[in-house]
């Protein structure tokens, strides 16, 4: 009990950093996902193929490899350009999470866009809107309503996957746990349990809110 009391303040700061990582990364991932979804469904090959290539690259390679490439690979290149300060644990962690999840959100939004009835597009054009205006004003709002539940789930996944930043000395809940376990290697179980409970306490309210939101959206649609 004394060990938990001593570790709790540091663990709470680590949990807060985890939320900050996700709070910055996820909106960036959503914005990137919208752009990639629009590009991947474009009739123009010069837009569609780069987007599809990026999506497949991010989805079919390990995120830890992407993170290490950004932190060490890109960091080394920028160091040669005297721009090394641009890459640190925060920027590399946020960028890796945003790029990786942006690819997944692109698929979520692509499915949402394709779920919108084609008649909505035709109606927008018949009202004198351009393709871009119809997409922004008519199609995208309906697609967002469809994809909100999976977006909530993906945020929870990111909350757990953000632990990967600990491998590049990013200060999050997992990295704090590892430091305390090293210092108290003879009795690590309470520290692992504390980290597990804190991750659970962060995830459960979001999951509950997501279920409530999904129920409200279903009721609104029906």
Image: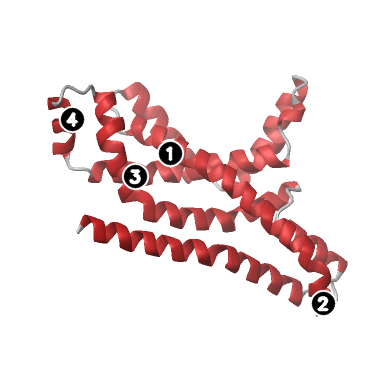
* Closer-to-camera residue (202/40): 202
Residue 124 tag number: 4
Task: Answer with mark 4 or mark 2, whichever residue precedes in sequence.
Answer: 4
In the displayed structure image, the side of residue 62 where residue 54 appears, left or right: left
Q: Characterize the local packing of mark 2: few (<14), some (14-19) or many (20 or more) Cα atoms within 10 angstroms.
A: few
In the displayed structure image, the side of residue 158 where residue 153 appears, left or right: left
Task: Give the label, 3 or 2, closer to the camera.
Answer: 3
User: Do the numbered discs 4 and 2 sit on residues whose CB atoms are within 8 Å?
Assistant: no
Residue 33 tag number: 1
Tag 3's secondary structure?
helix
In the displayed structure image, the side of residue 101 where residue 160 appears, left or right: right
Q: Characterize the local packing of mark 4: few (<14), some (14-19) or many (20 or more) Cα atoms within 10 angstroms.
A: some
Task: Give the label, 3 or 1, closer to the camera.
Answer: 3
* Closer-to-camera residue (41/219): 219
Instruction: Tell me the CA gap for discs 3 and 2.
Output: 47 Å
Instruction: Tell me the CA gap for discs 1 and 2.
Output: 43 Å
Residue 144 tag number: 3
Q: Name the residue that disc number 2 marks.
A: 187
Task: Answer with mark 3 or mark 1, whichever residue precedes in sequence.
Answer: 1
Q: What is the quadrant of residue 8 in the picture? A: bottom right
Query: Which residue is rendered at x = 64% and y = 48% of the image?
Result: 20
Query: Which residue is rendered at x = 68% and y = 55% of the image?
Result: 16
């Amino acid at each position: 009990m004394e060990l938990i009391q001593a570790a709790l303040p540091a663990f709470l700061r680590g949990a807060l950093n985890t939320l900050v990582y996700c709070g910055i990364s996820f909106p960036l991932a959503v914005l990137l996902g919208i752009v990639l979804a629009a590009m991947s469904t474009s009739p123009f090959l010069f837009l569609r193929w780069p987007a599809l290539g990026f999506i497949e690259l991010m989805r079919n390679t390990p995120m830890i490899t992407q993170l290490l490439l950004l932190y060490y690979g890109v960091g080394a290149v920028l160091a040669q350009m005297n721009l090394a300060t641009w890459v640190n644990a925060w920027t590399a962690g946020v960028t890796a999470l945003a790029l990786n999840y942006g690819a997944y959100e692109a698929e979520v939004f692509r499915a949402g866009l394709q779920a919108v009835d084609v008649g909505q597009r035709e109606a927008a054009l018949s009202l004198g809107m351009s393709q871009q205006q119809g997409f922004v004003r008519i199609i995208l709002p309906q697609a967002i309503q469809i994809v909100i539940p999976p977006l909530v789930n993906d945020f929870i996944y990111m909350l757990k996957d953000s632990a990967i930043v600990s491998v590049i000395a990013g200060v999050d809940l997992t990295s704090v746990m590892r430091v305390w376990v090293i210092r108290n290697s003879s009795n690590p179980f309470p520290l692992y349990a504390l980290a597990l409970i804190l991750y659970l306490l962060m995830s459960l309210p979001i999951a509950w809110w997501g279920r409530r939101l999904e129920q409200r959206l279903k009721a609104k649609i029906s």
